[in-house]
Amino acid sequence: MPDLEIGELRILVAVERECGFSAAAAALGMTQSAVSHSVRGSERKLGAVLFDRGRKGATPTAAGTRAVAHARRVLRLLEVMRAEVRGAATDSAAVTAAGPLRIAAFRSAALHLLPAALERLAARHPEIVPEVRIVREVGRGSAGEVLDGRADLAVATIGTSSPVPPELVGGVLVEEAYALVHPAGHAAPRSLPLVDWTENCTSYTRDWWQRQEWLPPATVRTEDDGAVLSLVSSGFGMAVMPQLSLIGAPDTVEITDLGPERPTRSVGYVTTPELAGTVAVRALIRELRALSPAVLQDRVSDSRKSD
């Protein structure tokens, strides 16, 4: 069977994005019958049903999810190829980069790691336009955005308990330690209720957590680390939080070191092997590597700490 054509890839992506054949046809300026015919042709070529058809639209099957992810990544590579080839034709001395650079990151990384790196990136490559999406670091997290072709690079938690997916490449940027956070001046902070959020319940801390007899089960769970800090600041409870989440913590909270056995987690970047060699992604990785340790150390050192 022949390979899928570029137009067929665009249609697969549109059907998944619009959740239906009619909506995809409208978005692409095509007829519904043409979209349906194209999808059926793609299914024949790939040898799998890609969408479950129903009254409420079209839902990708497991095979369809994989096909759409690959389609997005192929289409993105074509965009990058076009931009870099044009840049090389304009400047024969060096390949330049221009256009969007899609980045996925979890909240604290987006707040405290990315801004300085993006500022330096803009100074060196003003034609690159960063597009940042904040993604909850649960399930497939920010790395899943790269796997699905929605991001070129992700800032993600990685390490032995959360390794870089085999389809991707990446590296560690910073190693952040966890600390006890509690209302400033509280006489017995370990007696307070525990406040937590879903992203914090990872295998990075699970073993350590189970060994701490003084830590009770969390009685309050919030959406993000910002809400945790707000509750602790108001005197509601205590929390165990990583360093990135504590940058800029208010004066009403106190940060206590958990000692040499404290848990840590690795924060790094992931991208696809193909995009890792592109000018824009290489440039961002270079800025992240140059800035992240200093940014983390300097900003956390400004927070109040006690033994």
Image: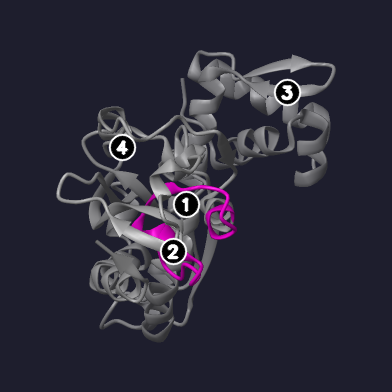
Mark 3 vs mark 1, CA separation in Å:
30 Å
Q: Which callout, 3 or 2, points at the residue further toward the start of the chain?
A: 3
Q: Residue at x 25, y 74 (%)?
A: 294
| Above or below: residue 164 compared with residue 248 | above
- For label 1, the SS is loop
Q: Which callout, 4 or 3, points at the residue further toward the start of the chain?
A: 3
Q: Which residues are magenta?
A: 231-253
Check disc 3: other Cα within 10 Å, few if <14, some if 14-19, many if 20+. some
Which residue does the numbered mark 4 point to in the structure image?
205
| Above or below: residue 94 compared with residue 58 | below
The label shown at residue 58 is 3
Q: Which callout, 2 or 1, points at the residue further toward the start of the chain?
A: 1
Mark 2 vs mark 4, CA separation in Å:
26 Å
In the image, taking residue 49 as reference, residue 107 lies left or right, namely left
Q: Amino acid at mark 1?
A: Phe
Instruction: Check contact, mark 3 vs mark 2: CB within 8 A.
Output: no
> Where residue 296 appears, x then y in whole percent?
31, 68
Residue mark closest to the camera, 3 vs 2: 2
Residue mark closest to the camera, 4 vs 3: 4
Q: Residue at x 81, y 27 (%)?
A: 33
In the image, taking residue 204 as reference, residue 114 lies left or right, namely right
Of residue 20 and residue 260, the one placed in the foreground of this image is: 260
Check disc 4: other Cα within 10 Å, few if <14, some if 14-19, many if 20+. some
Residue mark closest to the camera, 3 vs 1: 1
Instruction: Check contact, mark 2 vs mark 4: CB within 8 A.
Output: no
Which residue does the numbered mark 2 point to in the structure image?
185
Mark 2 vs mark 1, CA separation in Å:
31 Å
Q: Amino acid at mark 2?
A: Gly
